Amino acid sequence: MLTISIVIPTKDRPNFVRTSVRAALASLPEGGDVIVIDDHGDKQAQDALKDIKDDRLRVLRNTGDRGPSIARNFGVAQSGSDVILFADDDDLLKQGYAAHVLALAQTARYGFCAIDSFVDPPAEIPAFEPQGTTDISTLPFKKQLGGLGCGFWVYRSDFLDVGQINPKLRVNEDTDFSLRLLKAELKGVFENGTGAMIRQHAISIAKGDLGQITKRSKDSERAGYFATILADHADYLEQRPEAQAYLRKRLVKMYAKAGQIRAGFLACKASPALIGYFFVNLMTYSVARK
């Protein structure tokens, strides 16, 4: 029988992580466990979760360098399960989704799902309702990229074989990891049912939990990380023009948002369409900053 671990990295989110862990435990099938990795937080997760008495929960401190990618890799290293399901510390898995993942793992090697959103967590976590699956290879490229908070699961052996999550990336690491799986030509499935609920932070940050790492990262840093992704996967992207075009357009927009004119112009690769797109975004973000 296949087994599953839900890996949740966390940092200074004592309120959010309690809700996330309770939902993850409710989602587990028999034999599963939840592994929470405290990524060098000042507000220790062990204290935040001490009232949850459940043998299926392990709370560990990241002993390596800090960062969400490193914390997730550390969590996977502590697991002995066949399948890893990732969850973010501010999001919720629906009841029964983890059990459904093990059913999907009978015929696929990885996958992710449709999502719902919420501001305040519901009094009761909704039950997951399967809506059928789609082979990821048949989807448009941008939909082949799964977010690690979107009910993303993968066989642990495949996770290790493709090189884990890039520890150099603090954001967009899920784009890089999706590309690794696509390059390996592993069978992936998209679950059309909503298995995960993503928190909208406009209101809930006031509760004393640390904000989103994406919003806390500088625009120039995000652009740099994304440029690294394109460079690391250059050979693969040369074989997939639609993928390269989509990712390069995202990079150009990031450079525009960061106000990095020279880097953005060079990233356009002399494409008139991209150059026009870059300068439109550059002006738009320039006005927004005033």
Image (spheres, rainbow, N blue to C red):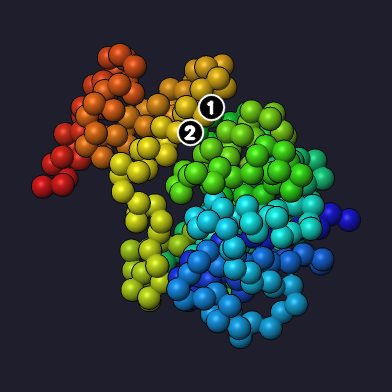
Residue drawn where x is 35% and y is 38% of the image: 223
Residue drawn where x is 33% and y is 63% of the image: 202
Picture quadrant where residue 24 is located: bottom right
Residue drawn where x is 40% and y is 26% of the image: 248
- The answer to whether residue 121 is above or below residue 108 is below
* Image x and y of residue 64, in percent: 57, 58
* Dot 2: element: helix
* Image x and y of residue 95, in percent: 66, 66
- The answer to whether residue 111 is above or below residue 17 is above
- The crowding category of the residue bearing disc 2, from other C-alpha atoms within 10 Å (few below 14, some 14 to 19, many at least 20), is many
Circles 2 and 1 in contact, beta carbons < 8 Å? yes
Q: Is residue 51 visible?
A: yes
* Image x and y of residue 66, in percent: 50, 58
Would you say 235 lies left or right of 204 here? right
Mark on residue 233?
Answer: 1
Q: How many marks?
A: 2
Would you say 250 lies left or right of 86 here? left
Residue type of the residue flagged with mark 2 = Ile
Separation (CA) of disc 2 from disc 1: 6 Å
Q: Is residue 191 visible?
A: no
Q: Nearer the viewer, residue 42 or 176?
A: 42
Mark on residue 270?
Answer: none
* Image x and y of residue 250, in percent: 38, 33
Q: Nearer the viewer, residue 183 or 97?
A: 183
Extreme residue in the front direction: 64
- Which quadrant does the N terminus fall into? bottom right
Residue drawn where x is 38% and y is 63% of the image: 211
Residue type of the residue flagged with mark 1 = His
Q: Identify residue for label 2.
A: 229
Would you say 193 lies left or right of 16 here? right
Extreme residue in the left direction: 290
* Dot 1: element: loop
